[in-house]
Amino acid sequence: MSDLYQKLEKIVSEKYISNDIYVRHAYSRNVDIALQGIPDIVIRPKDAQEITEILKIANEENSAVIPRGAGICEFGGSKPIGDNGIVLDLKRMNNILNLDKENLIVTAEAGISWGKLNEYLCHHGLYTGCMGPGSGMSASIGGGISHHSVGGGGCAKYGACTNQLVSLEVVLPTGEVIETGSQANKHSKFPFNRFGNGPDLAGLFCGDNGIFGVKTKVSLQVFPKPEYAEYKTFLLPRKERIVSAKILSEIRHKGIDVYDAMYIMDLLVRVGVDQGSMPMYENLKRKRGLIFYTIEANTEAELEEKAKQLDEIMIKNKAENVGSEISDGNIAKWHYVEQGHWQFYHNLWGMVPSNQPLTAESFCPTNKYPEILNDIDQWDMENNENMQKISDITKMRPIAGSGPILLIDGNNVEITCGFTSFWSYFDGEIHDVIQETNLKLWKSLLERVTKHGVQWYMMGDFMSRLMVDIGAYSEEYYNFMKSIKKILDPNMILSRGKFNFWGDK
């Protein structure tokens, strides 16, 4: 047993630390199939004070520390880059600390899931607005803030989950604890506003992908859930990509307050029907793309007026209503009423058994995504020879494309683009060529999409380093980010390797 292990064990007790080979391997995985790093130690602290002590020891020992919320990110965000380091599992920190009903603010520990938080809030007639990422039933709120997450519902109305952020408690890499927003004033009794008391330092930790500090406490705005809601799904005509983008833009230009709006491309419908995962669409004569909207209102009259305006946009663009019930194909109703947003968002990546995603998630202007999707199709054709190397073994070709296109704040959408593929272990054998080809294709596709000028948000290991490797950041921007990292984390221990911030290994 190492000296490092013994020092850490004194902080949390033997119950909450492990260097067992099985535990360490369990923490070497996220959702992605290509990347693997096995930590030396896994530890579960209970609060900010224990994290402070852990980070101070890690600095003394020059050991990497990898914060981990729920560990369900898609590209290496919460596991080591290479075989080393301490995984800091925050799952014990999953308590709701306070609900300020008067000021509509909830404060919770960063390890709590969006699902648990919203389940609690619903008993008070409230929700978080943006419901977190598409994996939000188990995704942690600390991880959502670290990634500017969207996808869990409500993003057209409320934007990314960081839009609702009021205050953070953060343990800096050297062990100091700070609070942001209104709590920067030590006389403030409770969180009430993010901005003021100087610069918006909370913004430094939003989208940082865990490199600038460990989030331990999060205060969010919460909202009364309106009494009335409507949800409709439409079958798109030909040239569906262009038409869907036009519809989403018209919704914004008319200023209609829509809760969610989503385009589901024909590829998802066809593959979903073929694999039996979308039985509601088996009877569709035309397996084309779909678009749906969800709206909320405080009165029936307000709801009817919104629906009327949205239906006019759909009809004008030759979209056909599939019917009002889920059995008719109204996925919008299932998405809202049955909380399908936490089961559906990454549907392309789970349709085929044994398939896993090699993806990344980005924002782009609404009028830009048809061009990007068309270019992904072109990339797919250009890389057919490499795809064939995998299908020769698996007898099934990888599927390139995107999950649903989701309207977010502004006239922007979220694109989850990439391809599905197979593990290198297939049919009882390890095939190194699958692993090698997956990595080659993944890098190639994401570099291609980067050159469309998209804004990556959940970056993890792979995307954060790729941006640096291909020179996508300006020299001035990258050096500025690196200088902040050096000040906050002089030994580069926290999330070591992301954005190529390695320090002395």
Image (cartoon, rainbow, N blue to C red):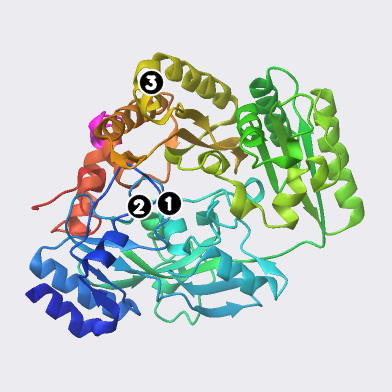
Label 2 to label 1, Cα distance in Å? 6 Å
Q: Which of the labelled discs sits on residue 332, or is there none? A: none
| Percent x, y of residue 262 | 66, 39
Q: Are marks 2 and 1 in contact (CB under 8 Å)?
A: yes
The residue shown at (78%, 30%) is 284
In reply to whether residue 471 is colored magenta, the answer given is: yes
Q: Secondary structure at mark 1?
A: helix
Q: Is residue 172 visible?
A: no
Q: Is residue 251 magenta?
A: no
Q: CA distance from mark 3 to mark 1?
A: 34 Å
**Element type where label 3 sits in the image:** helix
Q: Residues within 10 Å of mark 2 (few under 14, many from 20)?
A: many
Q: Which residue is mark 1?
A: 147
Q: Which range of residues does the magenta coloring cover?
A: 467-477
Q: Quadrant of the N terminus?
A: bottom left
Q: Name the residue located 61 percent from the left edge and 63 percent from the top edge.
A: 128
The mark nearer the N terminus, 2 or 1, is 1
Q: Secondary structure at mark 2?
A: loop
> Which mark lies nearer to you, 3 or 1?
3
Kind of residue at disc 2: Asn
Q: Earlier in the sequence, mark 3 or mark 2?
A: 2
Let me know if residue 443 appears in the view.
Answer: yes
Classify residue 243 by image quadrant: top right
Residue type marked 3: Gln
User: Quick check: 50 above or below 341?
Assistant: below
Q: Nearer the viewer, residue 192 or 444?
A: 444
Read off the residue under disc 2. 209
Left or right of residue 166: residue 69: left
The residue mark sitting in front, 3 or 2, is 3
Residue labelled with disc 3: 388
Residue 197 appears in which quarter of the rendering? bottom left
Q: Nearer the viewer, residue 331 or 387?
A: 387
